[in-house]
Image (spheres, rainbow, N blue to C red):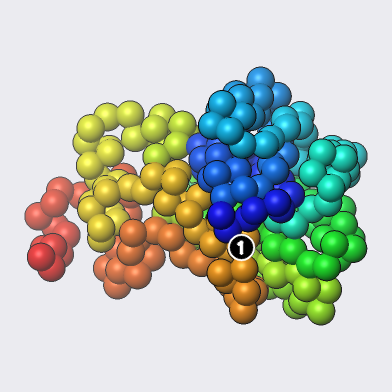
Amino acid sequence: MLLEGKAAIVTGAGSGIGAASALRFATEGAGVVCADIRLARAQETVDAIVAAGGRAVAAEADVRSAADNEAMVNLAVQHFGGLYAAFFNAGTIRPGNAVRLSEDDWDVVMDTNVKSIFLGAKFAVPVMADGGGGSIINTASVSGLRGDRSGIAYGASKAAVINLTRCLAVDHARQGIRVNAICPGAIDTPPIKRMLASDTARDGAGRAHPLGRIGQPDEIAAAAVWLASDQSSFVTGEALVVDGGYSAASNPIEMGDPRPQGLRRPPSA
Ligand SMILES: NC(=O)c1ccc[n+]([C@@H]2O[C@H](COP(=O)([O-])OP(=O)(O)OC[C@H]3O[C@@H](n4cnc5c(N)ncnc54)[C@H](O)[C@@H]3O)[C@@H](O)[C@H]2O)c1
């Protein structure tokens, strides 16, 4: 049990990576605040955790709101006696290039993906410090490492998450708080399922990852638990890439690349 008796928060816990991670944190012994803007979905995750013998409570929280971030940290203190691990994972995407993307969509993406982490840390850090330390994990993306077509807001936001992570790590290391990010490749969650609705699109996305498939939410949850636990006690300020080799390829195939297979370099194996 890597998180035995610890208190944790997971945002975006009603679906995908957040739901899988909340379950995994609870399996490792943590009491988990499952926060989501969709309360009913957060409650479903709580129900699954409780059914498996774990401890969890749901929080309706819009991560763009300071008051909701404060309330979710307070809930962890009330229910589980403090806060040790916070997985700031909720995020959103709005496609578009500079000409097409609306100003409102830019703001939604930056507030949901970046400002949320600033606000989460604002309230989580003092409580973690009071308890002797803790671990913050932020969901970035491989889209924060290089430029995706028609993804300016998402790409800029996830690059910002990576450097915000480093800044937080440096600021709060002496309080015993480690701060790391995870950069997932394509992971099989509802938004990706919608994007890859056809077999061709799904195969194409799989081929873009050298391991030959997209990832599963549990594979990100495993990385999040490791970063939350003492197993990673000398790791801080890191952006851990969990992408089946997607960003390692020197001649990456873009997901959704319309070129016929013959125009690409042959596979190495
Ligand atoms: N799935 C992927 O391929 C992938 C790849 C890289 C990064 N990510 C990132 O992983 C994170 C989780 O994505 P996912 O694929 O699991 O998506 P998802 O849609 O399955 O889950 C996201 C959850 O966040 C919640 N949410 C959205 N806006 C919110 C807000 N303002 N306040 C509180 N909750 C809010 C949603 O209700 C949803 O339950 C996101 O930050 C996303 O950018 C996903």
| Front-most of residues 29 and 48 | 29
Answer left or right for 240 relative to 76. Answer: left
Instruction: Tell me the residue at 34%/35% (across/down).
Output: 196
Q: What percent of the width, then of the height, locates residue 245?
A: 33, 64
Does mark 1's beta carbon lie closer than 8 Å to ligand 1? Answer: no
| Front-most of residues 236 and 213 | 236
Q: Is residue 204 above or below residue 223?
A: above
Q: Is residue 155 visible?
A: no
- Within the image, what quadrant is residue 192 found in? top left
How busy is the neighbourhood of tag 1: few (under 14 within 10 Å), some, or many (20 plus)? many
| Front-most of residues 203 and 7 | 7
Name the amino acid type tagged 1: Ser
Q: What percent of the width, then of the height, locates residue 1?
A: 56, 54
Q: The C terminus lies in which quarter of the figure?
A: bottom left
Farthest-out residue, top: 40
Disc 1 marks which residue?
A: 229
Instruction: Tell me the residue at 30%/68% (across/down).
Output: 249
Instruction: Tell me the residue at 54%/62% (across/down).
Output: 226
Q: What percent of the width, then of the height, locates residue 34?
A: 68, 36
Q: What percent of the width, then of the height, locates residue 45?
A: 59, 30
Answer left or right for 61 relative to 44. Answer: right
Answer left or right for 18 relative to 165. Answer: left
